[in-house]
Image: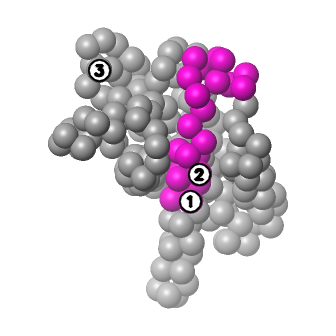
Amino acid sequence: MYPVLIFTSLLCVIFQLEPVQAWVVWDKSAIVDGQWWRILTGNFSHTNYSHLLMNLAGLWIISYLFQPTRKQLISALVLISLVTGLALLLSSIQIYVGLSGTLHGLFGLFALREALSGRKSSWLLVLGLVAKIAWEQLIGPSSTTGELINARVAIEAHLAGALAGGSMAIVSFFMSRKAN
């Protein structure tokens, strides 16, 4: 798990540097013009170093709490990031950067997986995530977070990531039940 976290952290730092950042941000126009890699890479670039540090702290904390295997973490990072990037094509967002959509997905995946496996206390984590997403969709995002990252908080990415992670947990649960 730790090599994946270190690699991902270094990748995010590299993606902050110009001219690299110009080639990796999620940019709807560029994606439509054929720069498909941005669907994935936009999740790993950030608006500023506060944004970067906040998201990397979230990644490390989620990984520490849930202790996924290296394979689980890699597959979840890639799949949730891809789904989030693709889902944003259906939104009005033109430019997106940040790992927060993927973080919501990772949290949803691992918390729901634990809950479905019988850990009752994890249902509180799932409920908290659902409440946060509902609040953002109905009331709006935190204005202080927006000021910190110097951008509008992309609640569409949070929703897409959480749905992707939750769906992965449900599919995994039914596949493991079917195998047994």
Residue 12 in the image, given as x and y percentages of width and height:
41, 25
Q: Amino acid at mark 2?
A: Leu
Does the residue at mark 1 contact the one at mark 2 (Cβ under 8 Å)?
A: yes
Mark seen at residue 22: 3
Of the two numbered discs 1 and 3 on the same chain, state the one appearing first in sequence.
3
Residue 27 in the image, given as x and y percentages of width and height:
34, 34
The residue that mark 2 highlights is 159
Q: Crowdedness of circle 3 by 10 Å Cα count: few (<14), some, many (20+)?
A: few
> Is residue 169 highlighted in magenta?
no
Of the two numbered discs 2 and 3 on the same chain, state the one appearing first in sequence.
3
The local secondary structure at tag 3 comes to helix
- Range drawn in magenta: 143-165
Say left or right for 32 vs 171. Answer: left
Does the residue at mark 1 contact the one at mark 3 (Cβ under 8 Å)?
A: no
Question: At 57% from the left edge and 17% from the top edge, which residue is drawn?
Answer: 150
Q: Amino acid at mark 1?
A: Leu
Q: Is residue 177 above or below residue 29?
A: below
Mark seen at residue 78: none
The residue that mark 1 highlights is 163
Does the residue at mark 2 contact the one at mark 3 (Cβ under 8 Å)?
A: no
Distance from Cα at disc 1 to Cα at disc 2? 6 Å
Q: Nearer the viewer, residue 91 or 99?
A: 91
